[in-house]
Amino acid sequence: MTIKRSSGILLHPTSLPGPYGIGELGASARQFVDWLAQAGQTYWQVLPLGPTGYGDSPYQAFSAFAGNPYLIDLTTLHEEGLLQASDFAGMPDFSPARVDFGMQYVWRTQMLTRAHAHFVSGAHPELRAEFEAFAAEEAAWLDDYALFMALKDVHGGLPWNAWEPATRDREPEALARAREQLAPAIERVKFIQFLFFRQWRALRAYARERGIQIIGDIPIFVALDSSDAWANREQFHFDEQGQPTVVAGVPPDYFSETGQLWGNPLYRWDVMERDGFRWWTWRFRGSLKLYDLIRVDHFRGFAAYWEIPYPAETAVHGQWVPAPGHALLKAVQEALGDMPIIAEDLGVVTPDVEQLRDDFALPGMAVLQFAFGGGDFSVNAFLPHNLRANQVVYTGTHDNDTSRGWWQNADEQERQNFRAYTQTQPSEETFAWQLTQLAFASRPNLAVVPLQDVLNLGSESRMNLPGTSGPHNWTWRFDATQLRPELALQLRELTEKTGRLPGQEVGRGG
């Protein structure tokens, strides 16, 4: 896959402004798309869009296929008659700067339940045929997900492997009984998914009309407490009680001295390979319905993955286990054609990972914040002059500090390395823009910058600190007034200067 020279902005939709405590797929999302177009951008990169649970991480979703109900635009539902003005009475006092996921779980669940009740009572009746068509088209994952969420609710939120054995083990009689007893709740879950996909597809069409494509993000692993693990248990390493025998993570690295213990169940690749990787083909097909480009998080797990015995307190004691990445990607390619995949190949990158990436001509990633560490930094692979065309360059990602925050917290050696490389004397005020200029002027075909860096925000606006469950992870939101027209013009001028403007047929800028 070859990406034309272009650029984009990384922003998760939860960070959009709006009146109801979290970003939504309505007016604020369309306004952001308009701003991207004004700024000459081609891509909007988002984090995984799945329904989040404990910890609120978009990388630990209840489904690899479902959408996050928190993102459903309530104003649109009101305009369509699925919510009434009285439904908003007693609305909480939401923070415009931070997402309170606990509050969202309670209040937004109530609001979406009311929307479904109005639908059942006859509101917006012309949606009925569209809803039924959606439920039929997506039945392969939606039926299991809706049943899973309905069962999870009646079990007080407990994970599926803590349910009674008959339901945990998906005995046919137990499932048939649950489907009958929980039919209204199951339909409600399906209807809420219908609302999400209806709004997302409308937003994506709006973006496409303005020349903006969406880069989506799929985590390589699924959550332990997910409908995917429950409904496809034979494809994961579980014991007879549904407990994982080994789990995923990464060994000690730049982000953590004890590694990262993710806790995701690991795939039984032998089982998946025997059926031609059907589940993966299915998953990529679903992602192509949502995104124009797909960033595969932790791509190296397709070459080898860090296997940690369960239970464990840290990720220190584990082992690398080979994975059948070539066979998997070949099977997906044969089923779906050449895949528009970005390989997140950061961290411990070994020759087998590079070979897998290059054999399928997939662009990898480079992060400029990683380019200036160490004494002999001149050999650093992330320095701009060492980057390749078939690569995506970032100033930082959702897992990094903001660039302004990075400069504030960098040690003197890193700062001196940057000064020596650029022959400049950056300040706290200028560093984020300088790093953005370096990214845009560099060789990679695609440059992506987090919105926080464009806005020159500090560490208080960081999206995530890996390996932690801190109160501010995933909660950052920006204010609509920060997207100033002059900022769009400044970014557009840089985009044009560096040959990244849509339709611009010029050589590499900078």
Image (cartoon, rainbow, N blue to C red):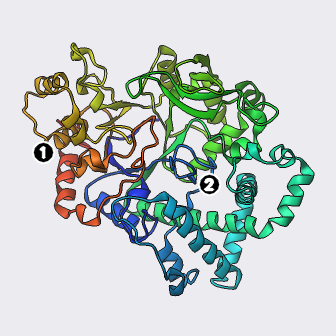
* Disc 1, SS: loop
Compared to residue 338, the image places residue 205 above or below, namely: below
Residue at x 65% of width, y 77% of height: 127
Which is nearer the eye, 386 or 473? 473
| Other-residue count near label 2 (Cα within 10 Å), few / some / many at <14 / 14–19 / ≥20 | many
Q: Which is more N-terminal, label 2 or label 1? A: 2
| Residue type marked 2 | Ala
Q: Which residue is label 1 attached to?
A: 429
| Residue type marked 1 | Glu
Quarter of the image where one finds residue 152: bottom right
Residue at x 44% of width, y 59% of height: 100
Residue at x 7% of width, y 33% of height: 425
Task: Point out residue 58 in the picture as x, y percentages from the top left corner.
Answer: 51, 47
Residue at mark 1 to residue at mark 2: CA–CA distance = 41 Å
Question: Is 155 on the left-hand or right-hand side of 483?
Answer: right
Q: Which residue is label 2 attached to?
A: 66
Compared to residue 443, the image places residue 316 above or below, namely: above
Q: Taking the image as drawn, is residue 360 in sight?
A: no
Question: Is 234 on the left-hand or right-hand side of 354?
Answer: right
Task: Point out residue 179 in the picture as x, y percentages from the top left corner.
Answer: 83, 61
- Most extreme residue toward the right is 173
Task: Point out residue 238 in the picture as x, y percentages from the top left corner.
Answer: 75, 31
Q: Taking the image as drawn, is residue 129 in sight?
A: yes
Task: Point out residue 139 in the picture as x, y percentages from the top left corner.
Answer: 74, 57
